[in-house]
Amino acid sequence: MRATLHSMKIFAFILLTIAFGCRKEYSFENHDARGSLKDSAGICFAQSIHGTFYNGITPGTDTAYIEVKVNVIKAGTYSIFTDTQNGLRFADSGVFTNVGINIINLRPGGTPINHVPANFTLRFDTSICSLSVNVSDSEVLHQNTIPDTVLPYNWKFTDTKRGVTYRGLFENNYILTFGTLAVVVLSTREAKAPGDSTFLINISFPTGSITTGIYTTDETPTGIVFRSFNEACGNCAGGGLIPISSGALVTIKVTDYDPATKIIKGTFSGTTIDWFNEIANITQGEFTAHVN
């Protein structure tokens, strides 16, 4: 009797184990996203390459990535990736919550080896597309005719309140002229995905020409703005330049400007207003940019 009862318990345990294991497998499969990297005609969607890739330099995921369009036909977890070519690969994973066209950013991994175009195979579900990324020669970064702006960033600062150092790449630099006033604008692209950040510096030159010296954010329209994706961190002041009435003050020091190459360099530090309208200290701010 005891042997029979013991055998029945073992049999019941085996049945429960099988049932539980099958249920887990079914749940996993049920949450896999389905879709395609191609349109209804079977043509691969165009990809958008952000940032510049250099041989021997590990690209920053904040500034160098591939924007990919996906036609999702079933929501769920996904993994989209390329193979490894020339020491570099791209991938992203997460959850598609909506069917239809979704945009994702493939982040780089590895370090490019040679300055040649790298041709990748991009995969999602059963669809396969090609992806080509040009790898530039890192030696040009040391020439005076090319701004030394992407090694692999050209601005950075440390938010001492949070103990975080932010860095990125200025991609849109220009000069605005208002009578005798010249305002140099250094800005990044808009933050659109986790890991992205948006940063802007305005420096006003009363004489109309860029000169070395010290400039502060209480001299409108000199100012800075910083946001990370879905979170404004330091220098935001509710989305605009730091208001003079806040008591926060950032000092920007232009240390060098070459009219021939149009490269401006400088440092900055001070106090800002963060997303919570609280004073935040920033230190070790640096920037280098080519002004068009």
Image (cartoon, rainbow, N blue to C red):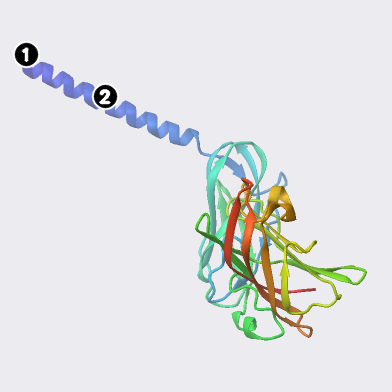
Q: How many marks?
A: 2
Q: Is residue 198 visible?
A: yes
Q: Do the CB atoms of the residues marked 1 and 2 lie less than 8 Å apart?
A: no
The structure residue drawn at horizontal position 83% and vertical position 78%, both measured from the top left corner, is 209
Looking at the rendered image, the quarter that the C terminus falls into is bottom right
Measured from the top left, where is residue 77 in percent x and y?
52, 41
In the image, residue 123 above or below residue 15: below
Q: Residue 144 is drawn in which quadrant? A: bottom right
Q: Residues within 10 Å of mark 1 (few under 14, many from 20)?
A: few
Q: Is residue 206 above or below residue 271?
A: below
In this figure, which residue is indicated by the disc labeled 2? 15
Q: Secondary structure at mark 1?
A: loop
Residue nearest the observer in this picture, 240 or 262: 240
- Three-letter code for the amino acid on which mark 2 is drawn: Leu
Q: CA distance from mark 1 to mark 2?
A: 21 Å
Q: Could you tell whether 69 is left or right of 7 in the image? A: right
Which residue corresponds to mark 1?
A: 1
